[in-house]
Amino acid sequence: TTASRIDSVFDLDGLLTAEERDWQMRARAFAQERILPVIDDDFENAHFRHELVGELGAAGFLGMQLHGYGCAGAGAVSYGLVCLELEAADSSWRTFVSVQGSLAMSAIAMYGSEQQKQAWLPRLATGDAIGCFALTEPQGGSDPAAMTTTARRDGDDWVLDGAKRWIGLASLADVAVVWARVADPAFGTGGRAVRGFLVPTTTPGFTATPITGKLSMRASVQCDVALDAVRVPADAMLPGATGLSGPFACLNEARYGIIWGAMGAARCCLEAALDRSTTRAVFGRPIGANQLTQAKLADMLVEVEKGILLALHLGRLKERGALTPEQISVGKLNSVREALEVAHQARTILAGDGITSAYPVMRHAANLESVRTYEGTDEIHQLILGRALTGISAF
Ligand code: TGC
């Protein structure tokens, strides 16, 4: 694998265990060998390269932070480093790992019955099955409490009706974790009425339609999902999740991966700008000889290094079981906001070439616009932090 030119600046290696470094190097090799050679074509052609799913499973990256059921049981920092290296290639593949491992698999691992775990986790870990996480609805993703998808009891079955939007992988998935409001008070009232259901995507009435016209995340698939009298048995409900804290705890997991991942995209943009600053000459000398270019590179480096160190600190807190949702909001807000700024600065150093697919920068910038919006927008995370600081909810 090609070393990153900025790996050594803060001696990140010295802060990692040999096992963590090994996970990172294997993810870097995967990204360089399996994703980078094809990603420009896949982005251009809006192609999801399905055959990589099993390879990600074989590498141990799917649900790698979970224990048992064929999962690797790796630490939070190892998982974060894998996210960073995959997203250094393209956000689509870190998103795949997030949706499969942090959302669908975490939901089953945290809230599923033993039978549900046995049925799905081993297959999801190998990539033999794909999972998706159906929370967001067409009116917007910021307020899941307003969801209108319902689950009503009919005999021993549940019948689900409603619509979901922006659901990653839904048209490829074998199983959907669907969050719905139950009407039967025996299963929850008020804020506790939101429950999760495992819905095989072959169930009649479940339809997933890929969203077209995306100018971001083009190498992955996000769908509209229709739930039209989808009938599932009583034991399709996740027994351990009552209320919105269920899906929110899954979002914590995915947001944590993004904190690392976005820094991978930023690192890639910095490296592209750094390379170009020594090879492109203007006014008779490399542009990297200009003070303004050096200032940009320095600012980019500061944000990448700060962001990675913050991710590492949050990872260590997570490993101690001490990471709070507010700390995750600090990380998600900072990482994605600064990664976008790094991508935009890198684009200016690349000048016109920066808008072409000859460089990865515009692709990362476009992808990061999605990352900025999903898993809590900048504004949602600012308001979570504003609430924590003032004690007053602005929602
Ligand atoms: P609030 O009253 O604060 O909380 C309701 C219940 O949830 C609990 N809770 C959490 N639990 C664990 N982790 C968290 N981060 C939690 N946040 C809240 C809370 O303790 C309470 O529990 P309980 O037991 O007291 O009932 O709820 P709220 O409605 O006021 O929350 C407001 C807000 C804005 C924080 C929340 O709605 C929010 O985070 N909104 C953003 C949602 C979001 O990120 N949506 C994007 C989803 S992206 C996605 O689904 C990924 S899909 C990717 C793909 O498929 O490709």
Image (spheres, rainbow, N blue to C red):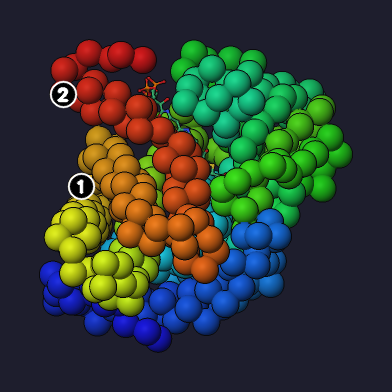
- Badge 2 element: helix
> Farthest residue toward the front?
283
Judge depth for marks 1 and 2 and give the one in front. Answer: 2
User: Where residue 19 sits in the image (x, y, percent)?
Assistant: 29, 79
Identify which residue is drawn at 15% across, 72% down: 9
Dot placed on the residue nearer the N-terminal end, 1 or 2 = 1
Identify which residue is drawn at 72% across, 43% down: 212
Side of 52 where 265 appears, left or right: left
- Badge 1 element: loop
> Badge 1 local density, few (<14 within 10 Å), some, or many (20+)?
few
Side of 319 where 48 appears, left or right: right
User: Where residue 153 sits in the image (x, y, percent)?
Assistant: 73, 23
Ligand 1 found in image quarter? top left
Is residue 287 in view? Answer: yes
Label at residue 389: 2
Vertical arrangement, residue 358 with respect to residue 154, above or below: below
> Viewer-proximal residue, 68 or 178?
178
The N terminus - image quarter: bottom left
Separation (CA) of disc 1 from disc 2: 19 Å
- Residue at mark 1: 322
User: Where residue 364 sits in the image (x, y, percent)?
Assistant: 46, 56
> Viewer-proximal residue, 192 or 80?
80
Which amino acid, by three-letter code, is at mark 1? Ala
> Farthest residue toward the right?
204
Quarter location, residue 266:
bottom left
